[in-house]
Amino acid sequence: MKELSLNILDILENSIHAGATRIHLTLQEYLETKDFLGFRIEDNGKGMDQAMVDSLFDPFTTTSTTKTVGLGLPLLKQEAEMCNGGCELESQPGVGTKVSFWFQHTHIDRPPLGDIVSTVIMMYAIHSGVEFIFTHEVDNNSFEVSTSELKEVFQDVPINNPKILQGLETFLLENKNQLYGGKHYG
Amino acid sequence: MAKINSLDELRKLRDQAKESMTARSGEAKVRIRASMGTVGIAGGAREVLKAIIDELEKRNFHEVEIIEGGSMGLDKEEPVIVVERDGFQTTYGKVQPEMARQIVAQHVINGQIISEWVIARNKQ
Ligand SMILES: Nc1ncnc2c1ncn2[C@@H]1O[C@H](COP(=O)(O)OP(=O)(O)O)[C@@H](O)[C@H]1O
Ligand SMILES: [Mg+2]
């Protein structure tokens, strides 16, 4: 993937396929206090047993029936480690899964974060039934928005209505710019 | 930590969307399936879906439901989108954002299939 925001979308889709009804994405970008870019995805999907977790970073593991190789997670782990970062995965069958990846923010080989707003929009567009919580921290500022609070505002207008989605994109972009406070985080 | 989150503008947005919904009811009901598997995402599925949303909004067309199609076992055709309209399921392969816009304008809204991009077609 050419952007971390696409890897994030791919991992969010794993949660969806695991039947999650609640997914929390936390994105952390720290340049002032430390040199860190990380994200964490927690879901209440069906989870994995220890054997599955252990084999997950073996590039030949997948439960997908349409192909035989799952490459998303092992490749990203390699990239994180190359950037003085790492990856952690905790899972419990019947409870859920928590995956985190982190990178040295300023590492020359770190892939760009890319268009995180579009990744969030995908959740509203095609997984509007899922309670999705997005937390974005940039140094000392943070932004958080959840599907349920948005639905409360939109009432009988579906969150995946094209006009609503376009407006949400503007809303998310404005909040992101405010978080960055004019600085460039990449 | 300073929390930034203003929902006021979104309330206005809701009222605008509501208004155009009631103004335009009675359109053909169309369903679009977009696949968001690893291969599709790497091939631009997110940008394709964003182009679809943008085109639907520009053309003020709301009687459409976008759902995830799952990986359709068509990895080499990704990004794939399926249009369900007039009793047919039409699958388009190797879709790029500009193609997606045309599919919305011609097929989703006006019911005209763009045959050269179709990779499968089934009665529903
Ligand atoms: N959040 C999750 N909850 C439950 N199982 C998961 C989760 N993420 C990944 N898995 C399991 O790990 C496997 C490998 O994931 P991945 O590397 O993304 O490949 P793929 O999604 O293509 O199968 C999945 O097929 C699934 O069985
Ligand atoms: Mg996956």
Image: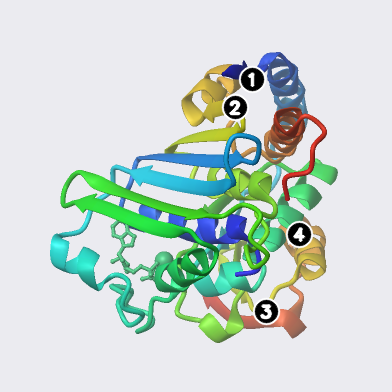
Residue A86 position in % (x across, y down):
43, 59
State how far apart marks 4 and 1 are (Cα).
Answer: 33 Å
State how far apart marks 2 and 1 are (Cα).
Answer: 6 Å
Q: Amino acid at mark 1?
A: Asn
- Which chain hosts label 3? B
| Residue under label 3 | B94
Q: Secondary structure at mark 1?
A: loop
Q: Secondary structure at mark 4?
A: helix
State how far apart marks 4 and 2 are (Cα).
Answer: 34 Å
C-beta proximity under 8 Å, tags 2 and 1: yes
Residue B116 position in % (x across, y down):
76, 84
Q: Same chain, marks 2 and 3?
A: no
State how far apart marks 2 and 3 are (Cα).
Answer: 36 Å
> Does residue A148 appear to the left or right of A124 in the view shown?
left
What's the residue at 80%, 51% (across, down)?
B55
Query: Which circle's residue, 1 or 3, is located before the other in the chain?
Result: 1
| Residue under label 4 | B104
- Which chain hosts label 4? B
Q: Is residue B59 visible?
A: no
Query: Which circle's residue, 4 or 1, is located before the other in the chain?
Result: 1
> Residue B5 — which label?
1
Q: Amino acid at mark 4?
A: Val
Q: Quadrant of residue A165?
A: top right
Q: Same chain, marks 4 and 2?
A: no
What's the residue at 38%, 82% (across, down)?
A69
State how far apart marks 4 and 3 are (Cα).
Answer: 15 Å
Please determine whether, in this image, residue B49 is positioned above or below residue A146.
below
> Residue A143 — which label?
2
Q: Amino acid at mark 3?
A: Lys
- Which chain hosts label 1? B
